[in-house]
Image (cartoon, rainbow, N blue to C red):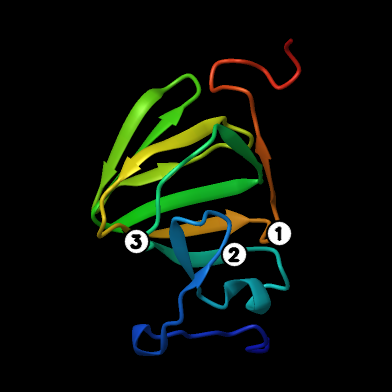
Amino acid sequence: MTNQGFVATHARDAAFERGLRAFFEYRDLGIRAATGGRVAAHVIRAAEGTEFASQPHLHETSFQLVYVLKGWIEFEYEGQGSVRLEAGSCVYQPPGIRHRELAHSADLELLEVVMPADFKTVEVPSIGSSPNSA
């Protein structure tokens, strides 16, 4: 057995960049490279001075977990309604679940783990309707 793919990252070396959502900053934890793209893990934090706007969407994933490290975030999930997550809260977002963010605190930080690393995000008309419905 080898240690190929081993990675350790540290907060002191953290570099956050804008990503999927303009109102968030993302810190890559190196898991994508270590797993050859099978898994991505990153810390997401609220971006200072940005305006929040979230459209209903879904992610084409096989696994997605969100764990809140600091602050709070509120989502609306299809079939679940509004769900508020606070520091220490965790949510498993099943593949293809329609959702949107409703609000978050200015100090929000969360850990997200997603499979595969390169997943597609699809905007949908609304939380309650099917993407194939008229």
* Rendered view: 95 above or below 130: below
Mark in front: 1 vs 3: 3
Nearer the N terminus, badge 1 or badge 2?
A: 2
Q: Secondary structure at mark 2?
A: strand
* Rendered view: 127 above or below 31: above
- Within the image, what quadrant is residue 101 found in? top left
Q: Secondary structure at mark 1?
A: loop
Tag 2 residue: 40
Q: Mark number for residue 49?
A: 3
Marks 2/3: CA distance? 27 Å
- Within the image, what quadrant is residue 118 found in? bottom right
Say what amino acid the circle numbered 3 marks.
Answer: Gly
- Within the image, what quadrant is residue 128 found in? top right
Marks 1/2: CA distance? 8 Å
The residue drawn where x is 63% and y is 89% is 3
The residue drawn where x is 45% and y is 65% is 25
Q: Position of residue 74 (x, y in %)?
A: 33, 38
Q: Position of residue 17 (x, y in %)?
A: 51, 72
The residue drawn where x is 63% and y is 34% is 96
Circles 1 and 2: CB atoms closer than 8 Å: yes
